[in-house]
Image (spheres, helix red, strand yellow):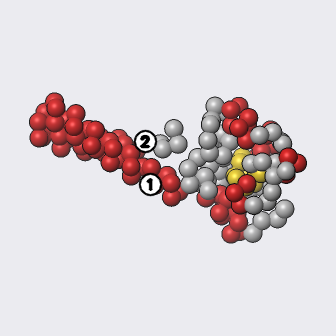
Amino acid sequence: MAYTRAQLDWIYGCTSGYCHLCHTKLSKKNYNRPGRRGSWHVDHSNARSNGGTDRRTNLKPACIDCNLDKSNKTTRTARRWNGKTHAPLSREKRKQAKTENAILGALGGGAVGFAVGGPIGAVVGALAGGHLGGSTNPDN
């Protein structure tokens, strides 16, 4: 199936540009360009040969090696080969998760800091916790 640029942009973005099977970073410009760094295909999460459709919810970006290795096996099986259990988050969900992690980190760090160093410790702990929480990879 031939995809439009808008379709490819949406598919690429649904995992923030990472392979949905192994979480390798993909290159938006290297769609269907074997041998190029970050080259990728559109994978049918549920293979067409197993009754899968061309609906957007069934289309995910996958590095070419993962897509070819997966063949018509299940996504769960292919992810398990790579030690993964879910697809990377979309840009919107990733941003939301990072914000939530930063808030929780700041609250936790502030509480620990207060217990150890009083009000000044609370401020230092909140800043450190917020920074650590916001810099954590939400896909892990």
Residue, disc 1 = 96
The label nearer to you, 2 versus 1, is: 1
| Badge 1 amino acid | Gln
Apparent side of residue 132 relative to residue 11 in the rendered image (left or right) = left
Q: Position of residue 35 (x, y in %)?
A: 77, 47
Apparent side of residue 130 relative to residue 95 in the rendered image (left or right) = left
At numbered mark 1, what does the secondary structure look like: helix, strand or loop? Answer: helix
Question: In the image, what residue occupies the spot 44% across and 54% down?
Answer: 96
Q: Position of residue 79 (x, y in %)?
A: 68, 37
In the rendered image, the vertical position of residue 26 relative to residue 136, given as above or below: below
Q: Residue 116: which numbered mark, if any?
A: none
Q: Judge whether residue 4 can be spotted in this image.
A: yes
Q: Position of residue 55 (x, y in %)?
A: 75, 61
Sequence order check: which comes first, mark 2 or mark 1?
1
Q: Position of residue 118 (x, y in %)?
A: 11, 36
Question: In the image, what residue occupies the spot 19% across and 35% down?
Answer: 113
Q: Badge 2: few (under 14), some or many (20 or more) residues near its Cα, within 10 Å? A: some
In the rendered image, the quadrant that contains the N terminus is bottom right
Cα–Cα span, label 2 and label 1 = 12 Å
At numbered mark 2, what does the secondary structure look like: helix, strand or loop? Answer: loop
> Could you tell me how many numbered marks the image carries?
2
In the displayed orientation, state which residue is furthest to the right.
49
Question: In the image, what residue occupies the spot 65% across and 50% down?
Answer: 26
Q: Residue 136: which numbered mark, if any?
A: 2
In the rendered image, the vertical position of residue 53 relative to residue 129, given as above or below: below
Nearest to the observer: residue 52 or residue 96:
52
